[in-house]
Image (cartoon, rainbow, N blue to C red):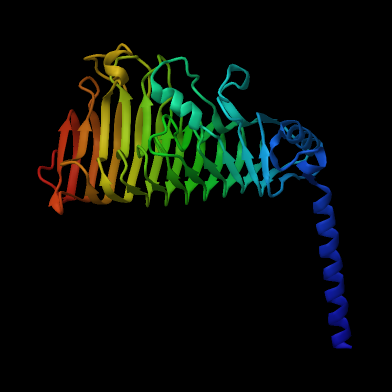
Amino acid sequence: MARCSVSRVVLLLLCCMHLSAAAAGAAVYNVESYDARPDGRTDASRALASAWSAACRSPEPATVYVPDGEFFVSHSAFAGPCSGGRMTVQIDGTLVAPFGYTGSASSGGEWIVFDHVDGLTVSGGTLDGRGESLWACKAAGHGGCPDGATSMKVLNSRDVVISGVKSVNSELYHVVIDGCEGVAVQDARIVAPGSSPNTDGIHVQSSSAVTITGASIQTGDDCISVGPGTSNLRVEHVSCGPGHGISIGSLGKESEEGGVENVTVSGAAFVGTENGLRIKTWGRAARSGAYVRGVVFEHALMRDVSNPIIIDQSYCPNDGGQGCPHQSSDVQISGVTYTDIQGSSASQVAVKFDCSASKPCSGLGLQDIKLTFDGGKPAEATCQHADGTASGVLMPPSCL
């Protein structure tokens, strides 16, 4: 009798599992059911839009499914709010952008965009931005090139998970998070040549409660860039290189900007990058109201990094063409600490604090900094208009 009872329980459980799977399957919208073809040539944009529209109207959580294969997508915009709660886009295949320039006015500088979708998961798959032709246009220096398109933007959304997504060869930024709250980016892989211009890996601005964990980023600009209006950002266990490092900024370009506060970067590794941990602000008095405060950089490893630790408040691209020669930044930087930063610098000066003369940096902290240069010699530090404390710093001179 006991064996019989156990068997009945097992059968009931299997039956329930089957029914649950069937119910889950009813809420899955496969793009091939809407005539998407995995041939890399037929535009699947309309199929994606139809699948999203049906899923978004579903009274229960729903999934848009992109199966294995290569799907050509000219441009896709996924708009909310949706009816049934959590929306999932599960990508098992590859989405490929058009050859040529996708960053036209018609696409608004974006290839794939999610807007006003609360409760969103984007999982798996590869986004191939095919940016090579645009990079070649910019490298030629003849002008007339469009800015390019960001591969994926998430705008004005809450409770978002981006997990296991791979982005390659974006024309412009790979992933942008703008105007969002509660975003988790997990195990992203981002790949573009070190020579590719303006291909920031993950850019966050005007957003709060964002976490980026386990990302591997190889690109031609900042691995992670933090724009105005960002708060409560945590970055953990990210590898960066090639690229320009992890940057807060640039800030202070516009006349009105939000500040950046409560940022933690922990356990990052940098290999052969231009910068490691950077804060940059425009070297001009824009009266933006921007600020940087409450930043923790900790447990970072550097290997042949040109500027492992840098604050640059004289940022002015194109040698003053932006109207900022010999001006002082009005962005206040305070409460920034660096703890347990180790490794090798590709330049003799491994720590450079070039702060604003009109608004000096305050509350800077260096603790357990061990950076070497030229085969093991202690690297150096330079400071301008910077105030703070230093302990356990293996480099002469300590300028704080």
Q: Residue at x 38, y 35 (%)?
A: 195
Left or right of 61? Residue 176 is left
Which of the 4 quarters of the picture holds residue 361? top left
Q: Residue at x 38, y 23 (%)?
A: 290
Extreme residue toward the top, this view: 323
Q: Position of residue 325 (x, y in %)?
A: 24, 14
In the foreground, 240 or 160: 240
Q: Is residue 284 above or below residue 236?
A: above
Q: Position of residue 1 (x, y in %)?
A: 89, 88
Q: Position of residue 93 (x, y in %)?
A: 65, 47
Q: Is residue 100 above or below residue 256?
A: below
In the foreground, 241 or 299: 241
In the foreground, 45 or 366: 45
Left or right of 221? Residue 17 is right
Instruction: Judge whether residue 400 can be spotted in this image.
Output: no
In the foreground, 238 or 135: 135
Assign the C terminus to one quadrant of the image.
Answer: top left
Which of the 4 quarters of the picture holds residue 264? top left
Q: Position of residue 363 (x, y in %)?
A: 25, 36
Instruction: Judge whether residue 15 can be spotted in this image.
Output: yes
